[in-house]
Image: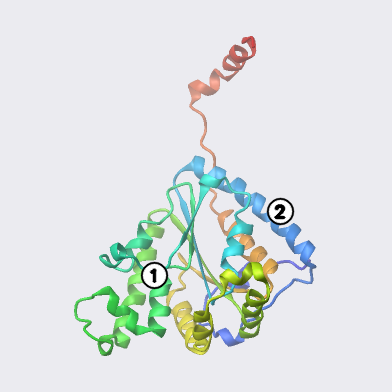
């Protein structure tokens, strides 16, 4: 299996999605990719234990992608070796009545990870510059001041929204949240295949919605919105990574490897030392327990 250059997926400069690969296999078989993921996710699970004991950082993992990009299965496979209490997954759907009474970032802010834990956003605050940009009429449900019709949603409106998102992420990063943002880059042909699979396989029928086909017709608009979001919001404290998503097993390995490689750089994340007095008496504590009769 070829070595994974995690830095090559990071958005450091202006990115054009049509130039980015949607398929990768590293010259490995599916079995080899599965084995590699098992190795990396074990290390991630062990890291989360240390993260929890250290108690000063939380990790936010943001997943975005077209329908069928593989977000759900990636979450299931990458975080399989975590303590179940160490990772919380949030799947953001259409805002509720309560959520609409707050600004669009509120529901995401309250879902941020506790120190010592991972939070995974399955679809994220970026929906507010993606689906709402393709369907600006959705903005009307936010009941915003000075937005009385779709005509009031100008380019300046989107510019401010990108700025708000950047400031939100900068604020939480400065306060101990390590941020990863992954765009699962799927080809249109592979999406077609996956939608057909949902129709062909009875056990997958429940995943299919006619609305998926309507949104598919807007593919080019969505891709343009993703491209703009990636270019305007990839920052050193909250970088975007473009992940080839046509091969699900490879995509999972890439995401897990990027996280592990970046997290290992936090040399201050380590298990705390025992109190000197407790450490000095460990031997006596051990003897006390060993003397107990069952």
Q: Nearer the viewer, residue 32 or 276?
A: 32
Quadrant of the frame with the C terminus: top right
Residue 8's spot in the image, x, y percent?
62, 73
Of mark 1 and mark 2, the one earlier in the sequence is 2
Q: Is residue 28 left or right of residue 113?
A: right
What numbered label is drawn on residue 94? 1
Q: Total marks drawn?
A: 2
- Residue at 51% x, 22% y is 278
Quarter where residue 17 is shown: bottom right
Q: Secondary structure at mark 2?
A: helix
Residue 5, visible in the rendered structure: no
Quarter where residue 199 is shown: bottom right
- Residue at 31% x, 79% y is 139
- Compute the Cα span from label 1 to label 2: 36 Å
Q: Secondary structure at mark 1?
A: loop
Q: Nearer the viewer, residue 206 or 248?
A: 206
What residue did someone put label 2 on? Answer: 39
Residue 122, visible in the rendered structure: yes
- Residue at 42% x, 79% y is 131
């Amino acid at each position: 299996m070829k070595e994974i250059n995690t830095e090559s997926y990071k958005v450091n400069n202006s990115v054009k999605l049509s130039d980015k690969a949607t398929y990768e296999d590293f010259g490995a078989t599916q079995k080899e990719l599965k084995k590699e993921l098992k190795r990396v996710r074990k290390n991630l699970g062990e890291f989360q234990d240390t993260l929890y004991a250290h108690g000063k950082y939380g990790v936010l993992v943001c997943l975005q992608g077209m329908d069928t990009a593989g977000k759900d299965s990636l979450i299931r496979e990458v975080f399989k070796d975590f303590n179940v209490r160490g990772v919380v997954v949030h799947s953001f759907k259409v805002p509720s009545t309560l959520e609409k009474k707050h600004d669009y970032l509120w529901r995401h802010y309250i879902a941020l990870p506790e120190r010592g834990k991972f939070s995974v956003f399955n679809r994220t605050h970026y929906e507010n510059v993606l689906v709402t940009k393709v369907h600006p009429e959705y903005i009307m449900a936010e009941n915003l001041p000075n937005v009385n019709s779709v005509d009031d949603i100008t380019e300046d409106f989107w510019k401010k929204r990108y700025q708000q998102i950047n400031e939100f992420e900068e604020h939480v990063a400065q306060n101990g949240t390590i941020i990863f943002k992954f765009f699962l880059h799927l080809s249109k042909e592979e999406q077609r295949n996956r939608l057909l699979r949902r129709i062909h396989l009875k056990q997958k029928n429940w995943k299919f919605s006619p609305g998926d086909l309507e949104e598919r017709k807007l593919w080019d608009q969505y891709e343009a919105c993703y491209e703009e979001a990636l270019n305007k919001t990839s920052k050193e404290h909250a970088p975007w990574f473009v992940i080839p998503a046509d091969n699900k097993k490879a995509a999972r390995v890439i995401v897990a490897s990027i996280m592990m490689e970046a997290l290992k750089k936090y040399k201050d994340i380590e298990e705390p030392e025992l109190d000197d007095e407790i450490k000095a008496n460990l031997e006596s504590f051990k003897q006390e327990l060993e003397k107990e009769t069952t």
